[in-house]
Image (spheres, rainbow, N blue to C red):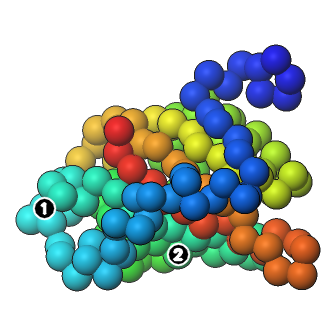
Amino acid sequence: MGEFGSLALHHSWPLWERGSHFDLGHVLSSAVTDAVTPKEVGRLGVHHAGLWECALADSRLTWSGGVYDMFGLERGSVITREQALAHYSEDSRAKLETLRGYAIRHKRGFTLDVDIHAAAVGERRRMRIVAAPVCEGGAVVRLQGVKVIV
């Protein structure tokens, strides 16, 4: 089974397959999810997907409005990676950290389903993360992708 034998909800893929894993990213416009505010913070409404990025140098997160909505957090607030990870179930957080490390080391994208706890509404949600490393000069400098409620 290899390094991820116990990870049932994952898929690792080479960067050359990036286009086939980001179809939603072509349809989803972060400008739209940032401009339209849901009636109630934390309520999904049409905001069931969003774009994200994490800089590896300082773990700085950049989220579109849809990601804030999924986590039930105030749009535009500064959220550290540690604060974001606290919303993941323990099992999901462990899987994410393992697969994230593998993606960075081997320059591979990944897809992973995780469980999160939304802050504002206090409910559990199932979220799919589609991620890919961004390389500069042959080194991975950030991860970016799409998060979707499933």
The quadrant the C terminus occupies is top left
Q: Nearer the viewer, residue 72 or 145?
A: 145
The secondary structure type at the circle numbered 1 is loop
* Residue at point 55%, 54% (across, down): 20
- Amino acid at the residue labelled 2: Thr
Q: Which residue is mark 2?
A: 62
Sooner in the amino-acid sequence: mark 2 or mark 1? 1
Please, is residue 102 above or below residue 8 in the view? below
- Residue 93 shows up from this direction: no
Give residue 111's position: percent from left, percent from top.
59, 43
Furthest residue in direction left, as rendered: 39
- Amino acid at the residue labelled 1: Glu
Please, is residue 52 above or below residue 117 in the view? below
Name the image quarter holding residue 126: top left
Q: Nearer the viewer, residue 33 or 18?
A: 18
Give residue 30's position: percent from left, percent from top.
36, 75
* Residue at point 71%, 45% (across, down): 13
Give residue 67's position: percent from left, percent from top.
39, 62
Badge nearest the viewer, 2 or 1: 2
Q: Is residue 119 left or right of residue 8?
A: left
Give residue 118's position: percent from left, percent from top.
34, 47
* Residue at point 67%, 65% (across, down): 143
Q: Residues within 10 Å of mark 1 (few under 14, many from 20)?
A: few
**Disc number for residue 52:** none
Cβ–Cβ below 8 Å for labels 2 and 1? no
Q: Which residue is mark 1?
A: 40
The secondary structure type at the circle numbered 2 is strand
Q: Is residue 31 left or right of residue 23?
A: left
* Inter-mark Cα distance, 2 to 1: 22 Å
* Residue at point 66%, 54% (across, down): 17
Q: Residues within 10 Å of mark 2 (few under 14, many from 20)?
A: some
